[in-house]
Amino acid sequence: MEDNLIRCPWPTNDPLYIRYHDEEWGLPVHDERKLLAKLILDGAQAGLSWITILRKRENYWEAFDQFDAEKMARYDEKKIAELMGNAGIVRNRQKINSTIKNAQSYLRLKDELGSFDDYLWGFVDGKPIVNALQTEKDYLAISPESEAMSKDLKKRGFSFVGPTICYAFMQAVGMVNDHVVSCFRYEEVQQI
């Protein structure tokens, strides 16, 4: 993509990756279904690259009933078998079972606390942490906040939510601004 914009180094030159970086990554998200979907998709990424999941993201939304937690929480063996046969998603039984378990945990959490959004954003006191990364070497894999989030999510029954997955989630949904300071998005995401 030839547009002379300075970006973070990770999107490479893949148009889908660049669009994700430019339009989504780091923007604060407060829609509860999108937060649940992103947490599940980050868990699906475990052991894979994000671009793999990004390429399958639309298939995930279709396969998992638009991430409707009420429906996902009731998936049975027939639905699991259907998902295992779906080449449009990562066909890993543990990750599929995790999606169901996470939908159930999400519903329990909402019953208990009322808001998944408030719960998640509470780990950063309701406002994004703004880092001042200079280069790719400055990126973190975990933070005290992602460790706390991971520990509490696991306690509440969620799976595939280790501290590294939680940190990637926090970066993606704008809880952490980890655009490098030279990236054109660094300032932009802070204005939203």
Image (cartoon, rainbow, N blue to C red):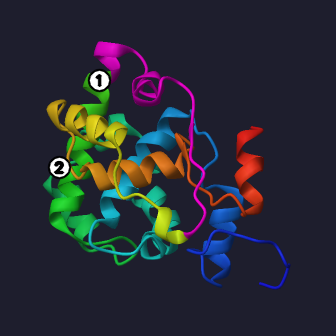
- Asked whether residue 117 is drawn in magenta, I would say yes
In this orientation, which residue lies closer to the viewer: 15 or 4?
A: 4
Per the image, label 1 sits on a secondary structure element best described as helix
In this orientation, which residue lies closer to the viewer: 189 or 102?
A: 189
Residue 145's x, y, as percent?
A: 36, 37
- Mark 2–mark 1 CB contact (< 8 Å): no
Region in magenta: 110-135
Q: Give the CA distance from mark 2 to mark 1.
A: 21 Å
Q: Does residue 71 lie above or below 41 as drawn? A: above
**Quadrant of the drawing holding the N terminus:** bottom right
Residue sitting at x 23%, y 70%:
84
Residue 178 vs residue 137: left or right?
right
10 Å neighbourhood of mark 1: few (<14), some, or many (≥20)? some
* Mark nearer the viewer, 2 or 1: 1
**Quadrant of the drawing holding the C terminus:** top right
Q: Does residue 143 lie above or below 119 as drawn? A: below
Residue 109's tag is: 1
Residue 90's x, y, as percent?
A: 31, 72
